[in-house]
Image (spheres, grey):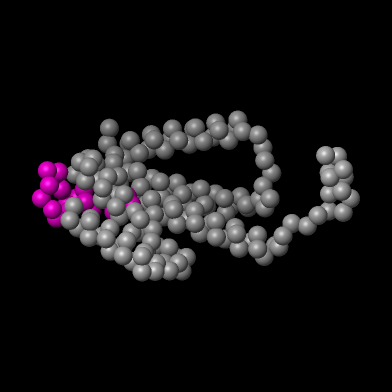
């Protein structure tokens, strides 16, 4: 089974499990429902990020082996997230963040250029950061949506008591 086929069936299985969980859990009314088109856009963007992450990862494993693909993918992920958060969310890296990013890049360089027992194939090493980019996109999308939701709650202000209803609930306790 190739990387794309494996990724496809994992995504199908995950979708089936998520749908089953959604149907089995009790309905909870959201405080501020998300419009259908925005919800579909979020789900689609997350799905694309997941598909890129998994497909590129499995292709990197096939090309250069599990050890190298895993280390490069999960070593590049935090670097791409930090840089992406700076560019898309305006987050500051600070001195410690810059040091961590530089250290991660140096470590990845040593791994890729070093002479260990693992076989490092360039094609696999190029696919692994593509996988990390898919993971980073999902993470940044989640953070961006969370920031937008927090901002919307601040604009709406705090919840206010409803006269008559709040007093009834307090006296019933």
Image location of residue 102, percent across then percent down: 28, 64
Task: Name which residue lies at 22% across and 60% down.
Answer: 106
The answer to whether residue 30 is magenta is no
Image location of residue 9, percent across then percent down: 38, 34
Q: How many marks?
A: 0
Specify whether 44 is left or right of 159: left
Residue 91: name its quadrant: bottom left
Q: Which residues are magenta?
A: 112-132
The answer to whether residue 126 is magenta is yes
Task: Name which residue lies at 68% across and 50% down.
Answer: 31
Specify whether 18 is left or right of 26: left
Q: Magenta residues: mostly which secondary structure?
A: helix
- Of the 4 image quadrants, the one containing the N terminus is top left
- Of the 4 image quadrants, the one containing the C terminus is top right
Image location of residue 29, percent across then percent down: 69, 44
Image location of residue 55, percent across then percent down: 32, 44
Task: Name which residue lies at 55% across and 33% down.
Answer: 21
Task: Name which residue lies at 42% across and 38% down.
Answer: 11
Would residue 42 be visible to someone looking at this image? yes
Residue 152: name its quadrant: bottom right
16 or 154, which lies in front? Answer: 154
Q: Residue furthest right?
A: 164
The answer to whether residue 97 is above or below residue 78 is: below
């Amino acid at each position: 089974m190739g990387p794309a086929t494996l990724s496809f069936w994992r995504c199908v299985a995950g979708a089936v499990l998520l749908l089953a969980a959604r149907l089995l859990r009790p309905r909870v009314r959201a405080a501020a429902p998300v419009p259908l088109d925005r919800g579909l856009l979020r789900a689609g963007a997350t799905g694309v990020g997941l598909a890129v992450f998994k497909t590129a990862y499995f292709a990197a494993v096939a090309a250069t082996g599990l050890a190298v693909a895993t280390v490069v993918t999960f070593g590049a992920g935090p670097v791409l997230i930090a840089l992406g958060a700076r560019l898309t969310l305006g987050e500051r890296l600070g001195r410690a963040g810059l040091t961590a990013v530089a250290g991660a890049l140096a470590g990845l360089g040593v791994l890729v250029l070093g002479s260990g027992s693992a076989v490092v194939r360039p094609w696999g090493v190029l696919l692994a950061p593509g996988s990390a980019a898919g993971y980073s996109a999902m993470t940044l999308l989640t953070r961006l949506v969370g920031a937008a939701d927090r901002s919307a709650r601040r604009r709406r202000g705090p919840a206010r008591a409803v006269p008559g209803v709040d007093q009834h609930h307090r006296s019933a306790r």
